[in-house]
Amino acid sequence: MNKHHESTGPAAEQQITLRGPAELADALPYLMGFYPNDSVVMVALHGGRGRFGGRLRLGIPQAPGEWGPVADQLADCLVSGSERREGRPDAIVIFLCQDSPDGSGGRLTMERLRPFAQRLRTACGARDVPVLEALCISDGRYWSYCCPDPRCCPDQGNPLAMPGTTVMAAAAAYAGVHVRGTLRDMEARLRPWSDPAAATAQEEALDRAAPALIPRLLDERARGKVAAETLRLARTLMDRIEGTQPAPPALADAGDDQLIGSDEAAAIILGLQDRETRDKAAAWMEGAEAQAALRLWRTLARRCVGPYGEHAAAPLTLAGWVSWSTGDEPGARVALTLALRADPDYTFAQLLHRACNEGLDPEALRRCLREAANGASPDARAVEAVAGTAADRGGTSPHVRRARPLPGGGRPRGRSHRRPGAGRVRPSPASAGPWSSVAGRRSREARRYGRRGSRARR
């Protein structure tokens, strides 16, 4: 197998050499910044020495029928993206990472995913880029789909090295590269609450706040006052969060949840649905306030429970933006991916996700937001135009969305939004409750139109 070199510091001379599948498998979390699970990862290699280039990750499709189309799209994304940035790759390395449900069937998982690995190899070969190695990582072991020699790649697989004991781990620690845990752990910090009692209390708070706030968001004269109230409350909560003692992530998240009341969270979540308010909040992106803002956006994302799941697009996008602005690209990609799951048409998340994946410098967007914070007109279209620089390159984002089937096998006829509260309280025919069809339409309008006359979903 060829040797692969990965830069571990700012100087090009600082390199380490990876030899064979074992060291490639050990390097994966350092390449990604986290331990990917339930993921396919593809990494481009350049030059005769196999220098690592672009990489992309996607959740492994559950249905084998999707493996072929997904393999074609992933190969196309990686090859075309590499051509725009570093030149056409000379080879590709593939990782399929998925544990068995009970932790005892890694080999069965490897065999089940073998056709997917073959489809990925075929898709890359069809674009004249060979797959140098394809590995399956499952239940603490790895297997090679490319090596037929049982002496180095036995049927039972090989155990992964203990974390932190390899040359790659030492080099990463020296270079200041941190692995942030598993992808599942990172997503858990941003997902809605699963505790039924807490989720119900937050949902009820959102139900109470929405009838009063949504008409004001639709009123051109009242919107500015709502924005000021939202930002003032958000700043108060940031100061409250910043005053707490540092703690490990799990404890910090639990503590932040305790610091913020349900009614406070509801007011900010709904206020952030106005895109100009969201853009003003995005100015908290650097320095000490960035970390407090990031903790607030994570907390609010966890509060978007039940039928308010789509509202999470705003705080998740802000969390992704602050992460990207402060140099945490893996965290940014996770947050922005979840934002697009919450609302695939959320324009700001689309543009940031694409710009981050294209490797753009976030300073241009930071400059635009600084100017707005210093008194310049905070034009949301200008902010999104700066974030959309990557789109002007004509690139293809490696974000792959799969269509979700509708119950009964029907096809979607257009976007529909279930109004919050539907299914729990049914107003009588003679009384239009706060979530009647009229109010539900108002909710959709408030979130769709940040400024009168603009029909683009932001």
Image (spheres, grey):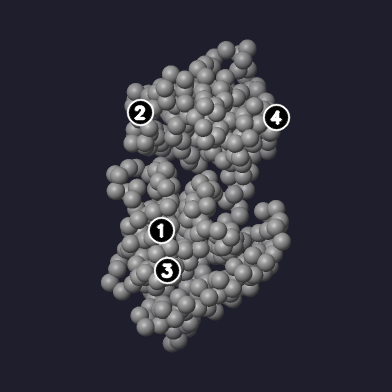
Measured from the top left, where is residue 153 in percent x and y? 60, 17
In the rendered view, would you say 204 is above or below 193? below
- Which residue lies under the disc numbered 1? 367
Identify residue for label 2. 88
In the visual, does 242 lie left or right of 5? right
Query: Which of marks 3 and 4 precedes in the sequence?
Result: 4
Q: Earlier in the sequence, mark 2 or mark 3?
A: 2
Label 1 sits on a secondary structure element that is: helix
* Mark nearer the viewer, 4 or 3: 3
User: How much space separates mark 3 and mark 1, taking CA atoms?
Assistant: 11 Å
Mark closest to the chain's N terminus, 3 or 1: 1
**Residue at image x 42%, y 25%?**
46
Residue 255 in sight here: yes
**Circles 3 and 1: CB atoms closer than 8 Å:** no
Q: Quadrant of residue 202?
A: bottom right
Residue annotated with mark 3: 374
Residue 449 falls left or right of residue 136: left
Distance CA(mark 2)–CA(mark 1): 33 Å
The numbered dot on residue 165 is: 4
Q: Residue at x 43, y 87 (%)?
A: 430
